[in-house]
Amino acid sequence: MTVAERIEMPADARDSIDKGRRLIRLDDGGLSLSEKLATRFRRLIWRTPLHRLRLRGKFPLKLLAVPEDPIPGDRTRGASLLEGRALYHGQEIALADLDFADLNVSSGLADYLQSFEWLRDLSAAGAREEIVPIAEKLMRNWLETHSGKVAEAGWRTDMWGHRVFLWTSYAPVILASTDLIYRSAVLNTLARGARHLERAAPKENPGLTQVRAWAGVIGAGLLVQGGEARVMRGELGLERALSQTLTADGGIICRSPVAQLALVETLAMLRAAYDARQLPFPAPFDSALSFAIPALLGVTLGDGGLSSWQGGPPIPGRRIAAAIEATGHRALPLRAARDWGYQRMAAGDTVLVVDAAPPPSMRLETGGCASTLAFELSHGPHRIVVNCGGAGGTALPKNFADGLRTTAAHSTLTVADSNSTALNPDGSLGRGVVEVEMRRRERHGVTRLEASHDGYVQRFGFVHRRQMGLSEDGDELRGEDVLLPGGRQKSDGAAFAIRFHLAPGIEVSPTADNMGALLRVEGGPAWHFRCRGTGLMIDDSVWIDEKSRLCQTKQLVLAGETAPGGATIGWLFRRAG
């Protein structure tokens, strides 16, 4: 189903689930060796004299307009820059030691510096006379390393697509110098970056990278003198990229809520460029936002922040709200994302987000997680059940970051301490869950969700089925995890564990019979937990917070051995106060 077809559907039909709905992951086998080599070859071509020759053109003398950056900066990070340190998710580097030719930092901090996203943070924290010298010094540092050398580190298409909007939005800061040679170098490099994007964008795979690249092509055409002819080509390219990147219900194909937010922010910055030229925002892009925003809101919890899926941290609600405000759209959260795969159950002050779909395609970006049928639960602004979160480009050790992607790091069931979908050494997802069958029913205010996946069928001969029901007032969540014999593999029984990772600050007190616990939520009402079919264990766990800090917490674990005929474990969360 296309986005256009979905627009014509009745509103209630867009937000419902067909009975017995099956979601199937195509067995594409990942990128072939020839495709990987072709991508590597394209990157090598960037370094050749021929590609540099293609980037030649007229020197722009000025910008046609200066858009207003619609995304607010982070004052804390900006204050650190004023003090001489670049700070990003708990990592930092002294500006005096910063060398763009040798950025020995985590990928997240490197992207923060290379994209020039720090410009918005710096501008949010200081007066013009304070920030201009810092911005110019860092800009000269970057130009010295990358302006004449087209290499992947500084010329990645997603970086340039982002950089176009940041350089133009903060042109009064980075072009405040009276040094005409420096000013000319900035504008000429911006024009060369636009030509690079125009050639590279069509060759990128569908996803956030291609969307950012085409958005940068349009932005440069609108804002940089001499590039007006590329606007139409960019609009056609971005319309095509969005149709391939967004599912019919508006979710990004890599299934990452953080990437979804980045896409919304990219389109918000593009809208600001059209506004700066007093031109109408094209209808296809506005339509894409009208679907992407409800999908984004659908994976937020009661505090307004993102739930943690596909390696992403819990982005705080204020940033989500700012991004949506910048688009000019208003929307309600999408409850049932049939194609994107996240189900939202909400009643009273309780919100539940469930991963009810197969994992992303093997051909997409690395970093996906084996999280099928996991969920996160919140009550009001308090998170109760969470997933452990993602490394998100932080400096965490690789083995620990890989552990955050496992099934055991999510609030769901594991068999024999294995992943429902394999994690390959190169960071991609391998074989495992192929099919998820799902049914959602809503009657008399009670929402029930039943879903099953086949990730353990070939290895252990069991289908995992999870049923959940949220009461009308949101005070009770009943669930049941079932292992059913399935497939050709004979079930001989296996060990299983059902994990519910708890948010930090929740105090857990087990009951005398080890079949339940009292959860005391700091600043919120207490919750009772009960189980049947096996006993309860309380173990240590971790959670990655919005600043990528490692927080110690607890998890509820229901463990046991299945018989050849399977197992059924019931559980209940009930508000106590």
Image (cartoon, grey):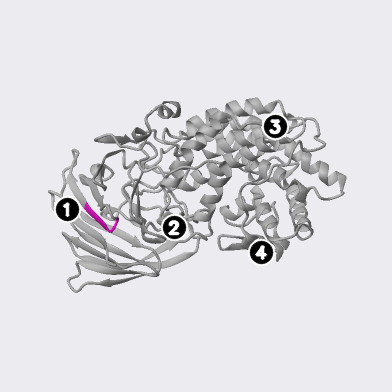
Provide the secondary structure element on which disc 4 rests.
helix
Q: CA distance from mark 1 to mark 4?
A: 53 Å
According to the image, label 4 marks what residue?
80
Q: Which residue is mark 2?
A: 303
Residue 187 in the image: x percent, y percent? 78, 40
Q: Residues within 10 Å of mark 1 (few under 14, many from 20)?
A: some
- Badge 2 marks a residue whose secondary structure is loop
The answer to which of marks 1 and 4 sits earlier in the sequence is 4
* Mark 4 surroundings within 10 Å by alpha-carbon count, few (fewer than 14), some (14 through 19), many (20 or more): some
Residue 513 image point, x, y percent: 17, 71
Instruction: Quote the CA–CA distance across marks 4 and 3.
Output: 34 Å
Query: Is there CB contact under 8 Å for labels 2 and 3?
Result: no
User: Which portion, as a residue range, is magenta?
Assistant: 474-480
Which quarter of the figure has residue 569? bottom left
Work out whether residue 395 or residue 217 is closer to the camera in this orientation and state it.
217
Report, in whole angstroms, how far the alpha carbon at label 2 lies from the one at label 1. Answer: 33 Å
Cα gap from disc 1 to disc 3, whole angstroms = 60 Å
Q: Where is the C terminus found, in terms of image quarters?
A: bottom left
Give the mark nearest the N terminus, 1 or 3.
3
| Residue bearing mark 1 | 568
Total tally of numbered discs in the picture: 4
Residue at x-position 40% and y-position 52%: 405
Residue 552 visible? The answer is yes
- Residue type at mark 4 is Ser
Give the label on residue 90, or none: none
- How far apart are the alpha carbons under marks 2 and 3? 39 Å
Q: Quadrant of the N terminus?
A: top left
Q: Which residue corresponds to mark 3?
A: 221
